[in-house]
Image: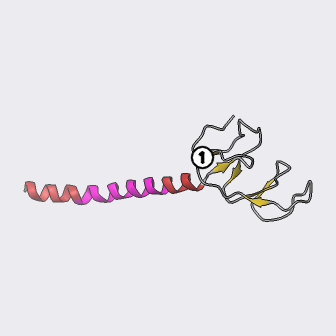
Amino acid sequence: MKKNLFILFVILISPTMYAQEAKTLKKQTTIEEAKYCCPKCDVCVELPGKCNIHNVYLVKQGNYYCEYCDIQNEDACKCYRCGVEMKRMNRSMKKTPALK
């Protein structure tokens, strides 16, 4: 009887443990995808904000930005302020406190 109860307990608990593990993995991948970097230095963080060193807005990894203005866009295009081609933000993650 005890053996049957134990098997029943394991069968009932296993799916909930797997579901929690899947949620944790999903959270980790979304955090890794949301990187924000300074366009003027190598500072990258996990949250949007401003760089303490250069006082410019951080650009989301994969987005495009203008080198001269504080303009960002998800698509490749020209800056609507100065007409320069926007560059793609593609930097490695260095965890440094750069938010204001």
Relative to 9, residue 96 above or below: above
Point out the residue furthest to the bottom here.
Answer: 76
Q: Which of 10 and 34 is in front in this view?
A: 34
Residues drawn in magenta: 11-26
Q: How many labels does the image show?
A: 1
What quarter of the picture does the C terminus occupy? top right
Q: Disc 1 residue type?
A: Glu
The question of residue 19 being in magenta is answered with: yes
The question of residue 85 being in magenta is answered with: no
Relative to 95, residue 87 above or below: below
Residue displayed at 65% across by 38% down: 98
Q: Position of residue 3 (x, y in %)?
A: 9, 57
What quarter of the picture does the N terminus occupy? bottom left
Q: Which of 48 and 67 is in front in this view?
A: 67
Q: How crowded is mark 1: few (under 14 residues within 10 Å), some or many (20 or more)?
A: some
Residue displayed at 91% across by 59% down: 83
Q: Name the residue that disc number 1 marks.
A: 46
Q: Is the magenta stretch mostly helix, strand or loop?
A: helix
Point out the residue furthest to the right here.
Answer: 82
Residue displayed at 68% across by 60% down: 62
Q: Quadrant of the rendered structure where residue 92 is? A: bottom right
Relative to 42, residue 16 above or below: below
Q: In this view, does 88 lie to the left or right of 21?
A: right
